[in-house]
Amino acid sequence: MQRQPDHQPLIKRLLLATALMFGFGFALVPLYDVFCDLTGINGKTSTMAATADNAVVDGKRTVTIEFLARPNADMPWLFAPQTQKIVVHPGEIKLVYYEAQNPTANTMTGQAVPSVSPGQAALYFNKMECFCFNQQVLTAGQKLLMPLQFYVDPALPEQFSTITLSYTLYDMTKHAPAETVAALIPTGGNDE
Amino acid sequence: MSTVTHDHDTAHHGEHHHHAPSGLKRWLYTTNHKDIGTLYLLFALTMFFIGGAMAMVIRAELFQPGLQLVQADFFNQMTTVHGLIMVFGAVMPAFTGLANWLIPMMIGAPDMALPRMNNWSFWILPFAFAILLASLFMEGGGPGFGWTFYAPLSTKYSGDSTALFVFSVHIMGISSIMGAINVIVTIFNLRAPGMTWMKMPLFVWTWLITAYLLIAVMPVLAGTVTMVLTDKYFGTSFFDAAGGGDPVLFQHIFWFFGHPEVYIMILPAFGIVSSIVPTFARKPLFGYASMVYATSSIALLSFLVWAHHMFTTGMPVFAELFFMYCTMLIAVPTGVKVFNWVATMWKGAMTFETPMMFALAFIVLFTIGGFSGLMLAITPADFQYHDTYFVVAHFHYVLVTGAIFSILAAAYYWLPKWTGHMYDETLGQWHFWCSLISVNMLFFPMHFVGLAGMPRRIPDYALQFADFNAFISIGGFAFGLSQLLFVWVLVKCIKGGEKATNQVWEGAEGLEWTLSSPPPYHSFTTPPEVK
């Protein structure tokens, strides 16, 4: 070899690029969450209780709200909405109940995770009170009526006439103590 | 780039100015770009046959509706490992092998810039695939969640082979990144005097851009598998909704890697075809500069289209439109390339030796794959095509008749240079025609069964697809058997044959054709001068 160019600077730059891209892969996780919070595109609703800051009821318009509930495959609880579907005016505050029962012989902890479809409507679906803000503890055989109080923001774009709210109930018993779970789940409700 | 003046002594035939150990140690310790290139190529060929054998299992099971040969679980493992092996074990190492062999010879360098790292980047690969293949024999079997390892399939519903899968992907990634760094450093620092950027052969250009893509996305893949590992074993919740994560996030991160990855597997193919077509048309490549710019713009656009794999996840309309239009935009630079190849052949004095036949088949069949890609890019239509055999047809047209055909073309084209012997042209033509007919029997009808609604990755299917599937399977077996012809050609050519001249092909231009056939162990010990 006649000339021996110095490869080190270029190698260092390329290794740095590799390390940065590895970091970028992980940075996509919070970036995605922020992006989804801003745009609501993944159908996640706010985990904070909303206040009905004197929202005006839009009496001319109606929106159909459908309620779905599903225990996760590993969750033995019975879980269903009392109301399948209601028609509301945007701005109108409504209260509905979900029913959960622990049919097992043990005390268990559950956590419901909401998802709204279509995704963009999630930004306009405001929950004032929701059982999903907290974990639920049910003793063996215990039955519980769980409230959900909400209103639809009158600013909801015209194209949405039906909003589907779906809850999946997860078994959190193994994940106790609660503070570890609270660290994982950004449930603002725990601070209430 | 053609006129070359250098006084290479064709008489010294490598072997006597280096002191390499013999036998197995020669290959284990080698830092020579040709040895490592050969190792990569032979490894890729071996993996091609192992992955191919799995495809044969898949096609044998799908020969008739109902479950005959294998259990559904094992079928899933076959589709998963077939995909992983073909992508990471066959296509990518084959391109790296070609890069090792050809880049130093094409730019007038003695060897790759980082020979010891080169040895590493090859020798960790067999371990990666040994781990992956060994996982198939574990209790509960190997990975069966598809090569895309979507969460929660891979995080919640997978066996303990997932850990082995993750580590093998890590090793493959490290190997690819080391290979990419080596290619970039070689091209930047070891070009012969006068070999300016816009005189570099297109194979070198396309590989340079591919190497950048590898450095950009292989670390993201490493991150993705790491997240799967920690979600599965260490209680994190990146993709677990119960813990505040989101399974759709997995698809975003995976396809952020996955889409540039498909260009990693096709850009070097563009470089190969751009070398072969001018040789056999006996005309310089039409639109060299536009080829370089087209390749670069394809690489840049590849970062803006990932979500076209996820139209059915419930994205907002504006996002679907954005990804649809960006995807369609890629057809423009790709079209530039196809038209340039056609224009190169226009009024050329063409001959149709085996490499040219494979390159021509590449142009036609890759374009068919490109067109079905355009169809899939149309968001509303994709809702029908998604997860059907139409998708399988599409990516096998771009990867088998695209990437694999280009690799076969490259092997035939440079084999006389590498071995010093001409391959058997008659056998080569047999290999080509058998492959061409069988590959179309295999993949073309998949478009139809896909449009008719046959889902992919399913071991059983509705009765109305039976005839088509039997036909497809026959095509599959024929294609698999045809590749044995290639091994025959290869063995025959390595063992002997008509002596190849230095230039080998009448129309061939470029530095590698100024070296002897076979070339000396160290390619250019004195840098050639490129005028």
Image (cartoon, rainbow, N blue to C red):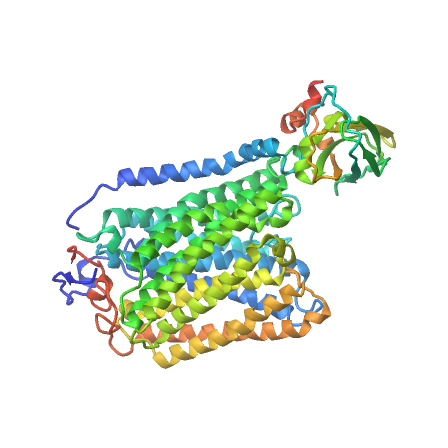
Residue in view at x 73 percent, y 26 percent: A133
Q: Give the x, y percent position of residue A16.
A: 37, 36
Q: Is residue B346 depicted above or below A171 in this figure? A: below
Quadrant housing the C terminus of chain A: top right
Left or right for B293, reference A191:
left
Q: Is residue B149 visible?
A: no
Q: Quadrant of residue B72?
A: bottom right
**Furthest residue toward bottom:** B426
**What residue sits 47% from the left and 36% below the top?**
A24
Judge whether A40 appears above or below B295 on screen: above
Q: Where residue B82 appears, x then y in whole percent?
A: 54, 60
Q: Residue furthest front?
A: A60
- In the image: residue B477, left or right of residue B111: right
Q: Is residue B357 toward the left or the right of residue A169 in the image?
A: left
Residue B259 in the image, given as x and y percentages of width and height:
49, 50
Q: Which residue in the rendered view is the most extreme toward the top?
A: A192
Instruction: Establish if A184 lies above or below B88.
Output: above
How many discs appear?
Answer: 0
Q: Is residue A77 visible?
A: yes
Res A183 quadrant in image: top right
Which quadrant of the view contains residue B425? bottom left
Asked if residue B325 is positioned above or below residue B510 in the image, the reply reads above
Q: Observer-nearest residue: B104 or A32?
A: A32
Task: Give percent across and percent down for residue B224.
Answer: 53, 42
